[in-house]
Image: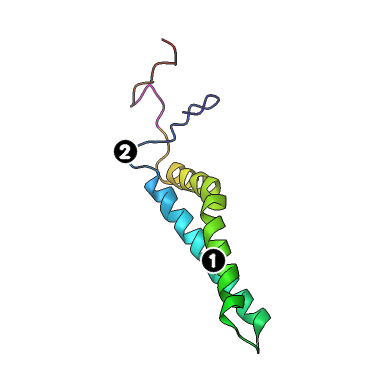
Amino acid sequence: MCPSCGLVFERTHGHWIGATAVNMVMTFVLILVTIVTSFLLAWPDLEVPWLLVPAVGVSLVAPFGCAPISRTLWTAMVVLVLPDEPPSLGRPVPPSVGT
């Protein structure tokens, strides 16, 4: 829960599976852009290492770099589709930490 606005991040069990899917799509797009760029830069002397090494590097780094962005995007999508209800109308307010 956000301490300043009260937004509940994990609304249901398995909430972050959607963020994982967003991360996977973002990583796939970055790998595809890397492969196309490597292909265009290596044209006319295409060699597999010049195409493979950058793509493998991006595929190892991109999921970790995109993780915070994908969680933020997923939370924004969920908030747009399912706005949070005021505490008085639905869900009970969780007790504060330390009580």
Q: Place residue 37 in its image quadrant.
A: bottom right
Quick check: can you spot residue 7? yes
Q: Amino acid at mark 1?
A: Val
Locate residue 26, reporting x and y percent. 51, 59
Instruction: Give the residues drawn in magenta, as a range.
Output: 85-89
Q: Which residue is under mark 1? A: 56
Magenta highlight on residue 11: no
Locate residue 68, reporting x and y percent. 54, 45
Using residue 43 as the reference point, say whether residue 30 is left or right of it.
Answer: left
- Count of numbered labels shown in the rendering: 2
Residue density around tag 2, few if under 14, some if 14–19, many if 20 or more, within 10 Å: few
**Residue that protrudes farthest toward the right in the picture:** 41
Asked if residue 58 is positioned above or below residue 38 in the image, the reply reads: above
Locate residue 76, reporting x and y percent. 49, 44
Using residue 88 as the reference point, say whether residue 28 is left or right of it.
Answer: right
Q: Which residue is under mark 2? A: 13
The colour scheme applied to this rendered structure is rainbow
Of callouts 2 and 1, the N-terminal one: 2
Q: Secondary structure at mark 2?
A: loop
Asked if residue 79 is positioned above or below residue 58 in the image, the reply reads: above
Q: Secondary structure at mark 1?
A: helix
Q: Residue at x 37, y 48 (%)?
A: 17
